[in-house]
Image: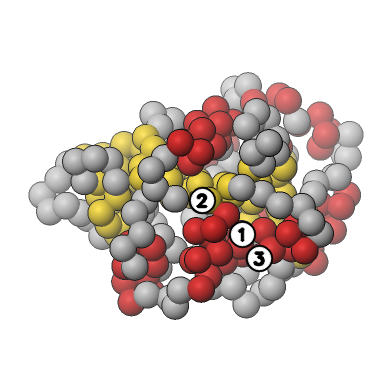
């Protein structure tokens, strides 16, 4: 039977927003939104938080959230996900595919997770990245990673800059990426690549080594929480969120 591991990386030492994984949105810590929404996906065998921080480990234990303690030396979330894969393999718990989700995208939708799981199982490529259309100010925001596609829907390039030139519409990279287990291990065997470092984008390491990445387009716009002011934006959008009703009782009991 095919097994899919979903990894939600989280660390307290974000340079732009320290401590953001435990910042609350409607009274629920952000990383908990990501975890419990991922649990609602049907195509995933296991969901786990991956963190180097004791504070997050303690929170997870208090709420029966499966968590793995990882190294604090990782520069990339992709490397953290690969360490989790190894940790489970050492316990003879093996997975065919890994979905890297993000601990700062609390509007994550289980239908998108399922679509990503199905895409990576059927793709001609070993990596699939979820993206969604954007326009206006988002195109100029360096916090927003833009994706450029070829005619076959493969990703040519990622950038924080406004690309392509003189455009008024594009695609945003979401932090939802599917990998075969083998290609995820390959990622960590490769050296950090020059454009990966310049752009500060994990997936450039694959592109710079001629490893193709498929795109999967969703029409669901997700706000990545990069700055404190993003919390209010997300709270407004999640005001009547139906998925949150499935897990908010967990935190009501803890009050």
Tell whether 174 sits left or right of 100: left
* Few, some or many residues within 10 Å of mark 2 (<14, 14–19, 20+): many
Q: Do the numbered discs 2 and 1 sit on residues whose CB atoms are within 8 Å?
A: yes
Q: Earlier in the sequence, mark 2 or mark 3?
A: 3
**Residue drawn where x is 63% and y is 21% of the image:** 242
Q: Position of residue 182 (x, y in %)?
A: 54, 58
Foreground pick, 97 / 223: 97
Foreground pick, 103 / 229: 103
In the figure, 28 relative to 210: above or below? Answer: above
Q: Mark 3 — residue?
A: 83
Q: Position of residue 112 (x, y in %)?
A: 51, 32
Q: Earlier in the sequence, mark 2 or mark 1?
A: 1
Disc 2 element: strand
The quarter of the picture where the C terminus appears is top right
The quarter of the picture where the N terminus appears is top right
Choose mark 2 or mark 1, whichever is in front. 2
In the rendered image, is residue 8 in sight?
Answer: yes
The quarter of the displayed image where residue 153 is located: top left
Q: Which mark is residue 81?
A: 1
**Residue drawn where x is 49% and y is 66% of the image:** 187
Q: Position of residue 217 (x, y in %)?
A: 37, 35
The quarter of the displayed image where residue 196 is located: bottom left
In the figure, 77 relative to 149: above or below? Answer: below
How much space separates mark 2 and mark 3, taking CA atoms? 14 Å
In the rendered image, is residue 225 in sight?
Answer: no
* Few, some or many residues within 10 Å of mark 1 (<14, 14–19, 20+): many
Q: Position of residue 80 (x, y in %)?
A: 61, 64
In the figure, 23 relative to 199: above or below? Answer: above
Q: Do the numbered discs 3 and 1 sit on residues whose CB atoms are within 8 Å?
A: yes
Q: Mark 2 — residue?
A: 179
The total number of labels drawn is: 3
Foreground pick, 93 / 81: 93
């Amino acid at each position: 039977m095919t097994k899919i591991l979903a990894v939600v990386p989280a660390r307290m030492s974000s340079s732009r927003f320290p401590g953001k994984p435990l910042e609350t949105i409607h009274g629920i810590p952000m990383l908990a939104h990501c975890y419990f929404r991922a649990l609602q996906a049907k195509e995933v065998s296991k969901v786990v938080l991956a963190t180097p921080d004791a504070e997050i480990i303690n929170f997870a234990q208090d709420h029966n959230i499966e968590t793995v303690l990882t190294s604090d030396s990782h520069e990339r979330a992709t490397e953290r996900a690969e360490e989790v894969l190894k940790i489970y393999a050492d316990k003879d718990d093996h997975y065919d595919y890994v979905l890297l989700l993000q601990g700062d995208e609390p509007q994550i939708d289980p239908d998108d997770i399922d679509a990503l799981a199905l895409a990576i199982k059927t793709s001609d490529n070993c990596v699939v990245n979820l993206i969604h259309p954007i326009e206006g100010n988002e195109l100029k925001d360096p916090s927003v990673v833009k994706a450029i596609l070829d005619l076959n829907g493969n990703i040519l390039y990622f950038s924080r800059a406004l690309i392509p030139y003189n455009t008024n519409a594009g695609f945003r990279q979401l932090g939802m990426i599917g990998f075969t287990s083998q290609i995820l291990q390959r990622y960590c065997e490769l050296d950090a690549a020059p454009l990966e470092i310049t752009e500060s984008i994990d997936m450039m390491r694959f592109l710079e080594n001629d490893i193709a990445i498929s795109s999967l387009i969703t029409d669901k716009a997700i706000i990545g929480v990069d700055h404190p002011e993003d919390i209010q934006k997300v709270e407004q959008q999640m005001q009547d969120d139906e998925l949150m009703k499935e897990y908010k009782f967990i935190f009501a009991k803890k009050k």
